[in-house]
Image: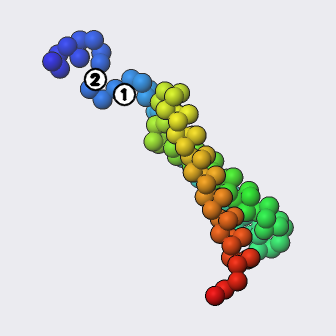
Amino acid sequence: MSEIHTEHGHDDHGHGEHAGLDKKKIWQVFGILLLITVIEFIIALWVLPKGYMSHGIGNFVYIALTLLKAYYIVAYFMHLKYEKLGLQLSLTVSFIFIIYFIVLMLIEGGYLHLHMPLV
């Protein structure tokens, strides 16, 4: 059985479809993740404490950079970039709904905390 796979150039692990992820690409993604992390540390340890940026804008930028890092990790190291479009869309839509419901719960929890008297 393995002779048939080797004759046709197929292997059992399907590495041919992930050919775009070579050592150069891995180091490139690592460099991007490292750069984003350094920027996050600069914002958290220097920009915000010195008052060069408001905390609202700083938090927004920090969250955006963290989501960008999460995209690179999921896309390249968890191989989602190489999956079919249907799977990518279903996972992305599910993730957006989860974030949306978490935000709604935080808003409602804050509302109830502020407007309900303590018993």
Mark 2, residue position: 11
Residue visible at 46% across and 37% down in the picture: 79
- Residue 113 x/y as whole percent: 68, 76
Q: How many marks can you see?
A: 2
Q: How far is mark 2 from mark 1, CA to CA?
A: 7 Å
Q: How crowded is mark 2: few (under 14 residues within 10 Å), some or many (20 or more)?
A: few
The type of residue carrying mark 2 is Asp
Mark 1, residue position: 15
- Nearer-the-camera pick, 62 or 41: 62
Residue visible at 67% across and 65% down in the picture: 108
Asked whether residue 38 appears in the rendered view, the answer is: no
Q: Is residue 103 left or right of residue 9?
A: right
The type of residue carrying mark 1 is His
- Residue 15 x/y as whole percent: 36, 27
Asked whether residue 94 appears in the rendered view, the answer is: yes
- Nearer-the-camera pick, 32 or 73: 73
Residue visible at 66% across and 86% down in the picture: 118
